[in-house]
Image (cartoon, grey):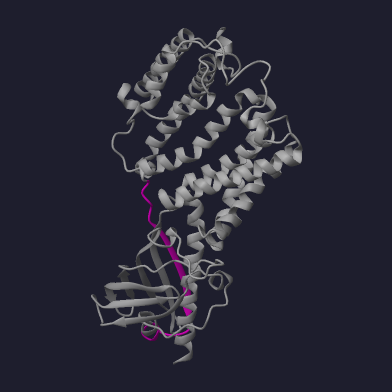
Amino acid sequence: MRPTSFWQWQGKAKRSTYAAVGIGAFATKFLFDWLLVTQLFHRRWNLLSYWRPFGAISGIHGLGVEDRVFAGTMLFLAVPFVWLGLAMTVKRLRDAGQPSWLCGLFFVPLVNLLFFLTLSVLPSAATSPYESTPWPGPHFLDRWIPRSKAGSALASIAATTLFGLLFAWIGTRTAASYGWGLFLGLPFCLGLFAVLTYSYHGPRRTDECIAVALLPVAILSGVLLLVAIEGLICILMAAPLALTMSLLGGYLGTVIQAAYWGRRNAPAVLSMVMLLAPGMFGIELFTRPQPAVFVVNSGIEIEAPPERVWQRVIAFAEIPPPTETIFRAGIAYPIRAEIAGRGPGAVRHCVFSTGAFVEPITVWDEPHLLRFSVTENPAPMNELTPYGHFKPRHLHGYFESHQGQFVLTELPGGRTRVEGTTWYSHSMWPETYWHWWSDYIIHRIHMRVLEHIRSEAETHR
């Protein structure tokens, strides 16, 4: 083999070539990594550093800015070596007469070392049931992927939807993870898998590939609703992110099918795509990212003095039914507030449509500041579903309010400015995307309460 062919997926690699290239590539990468880490980042680096490059951390949110730059640099440097390793592994499997989907073991820690040693000693096979030139008879993919455009599109959409349903169930029910794997990795893989399956028998037009990439995600959303894994509200909130990632995966699929695709490489590429989604779930379970605490502040001016406003802040009568779309759709909304006792140690109950927040008072500075912790959180919404009362996992423990306060500031002319603040966290990723949604919802909750307080304070003089 010529060195330039090491990076190609076609052909075969004998065990001696595979072992030599693997050892040489690892030695080269270790040298590059050692020089980069010690000279640029001024850190220590050895073989064990590949397993724990940062030591013991709680997750990606436990990394500082410098550590994240370091991680990104190391990942960027690893990409060409990953490509080389996969290409050589597929060729070695082909030479040994083994199914190329086994290349997925390349990504399994510790197992990949034994896998490399096994392939380095496994002899070449005279013939193989998994490859030949030209392609022999009907391959298992040939049997279930029709050759027509319509048939291959339907097969692709059906297989991708089932694939997505399986891993959505694993992610939400078994791994209990609402993060990168579910909202980024899975839709990206669905789009990529759909296009690669659709284009198995030959290149397809870009617009057709994009349509095939997006349809399974849309169909899967309906299936998740019908089988009671998710409710309509969360599906609609996740849709922009999921469709975008599916579009990116589909576009990558069009590039692959135009440049690298072929039935001989089909099992290897499709197996890697199928392993990517559960791999991301596994990484999330291992790293257990820690949620950040966010702050939302909302304010309003009231034509009443602080003393009168204070009485409506600590407790207020029932608020009329909501007219806002988000609340009528099922997002939890405040109904009334009750308080038992006065001063620090009193307990306030802010009753929502899904239950009550229990809020022990920590600061009572009448009529200027009311601050409280939150010891109990009700569900953040009532999911819309065909099955009536439905409680997916994310309704409990994935959104937590930690603390709140009301600040009253006296203004000229007997007016008062009231500011409500909530400190909260959520365990859904990408954190920034869900942060936009939760900030908006909490702001609308604040304004529903503040506008009611204003109405009561200005009416009852």
Residue at left 69%, top 44%? 154
Instruction: Give left or right: position of 169 versus 367.
Output: right
Q: Residue at x 56, y 67 (%)?
A: 386
For the point 49% across and 35% down, the residue is 275
Picture coordinates of residue 15, whole percent (x, y): 47, 10
Marker count (numbered): 0
Q: Residue 153: image x %, image y %?
A: 70, 41
Height in image: 329 above or below 208? below
- Extreme left residue here? 345
Q: Hey, which quadrant is residue 233 in on the image?
A: bottom right
Give the camera-side residue of 99 and 457: 99
Q: Indicate yes or no whether the magenta region holds residue 307.
A: yes
* Position of the N terminus by quadrant: top right
What residue span does the magenta drawing correspond to? Answer: 289-309
Q: Position of residue 388 (x, y in %)?
A: 52, 70
- Please check the rendered image and state whether residue 163 is part of the magenta-colored stretch, yes or no: no
Image quadrant where one finds the C terminus: bottom left
Q: Say if residue 429 shows up in the picture.
A: no
Residue 450 visible? The answer is yes
Q: Quadrant of residue 20?
A: top left
Q: Is residue 278 above or below residue 111?
A: below
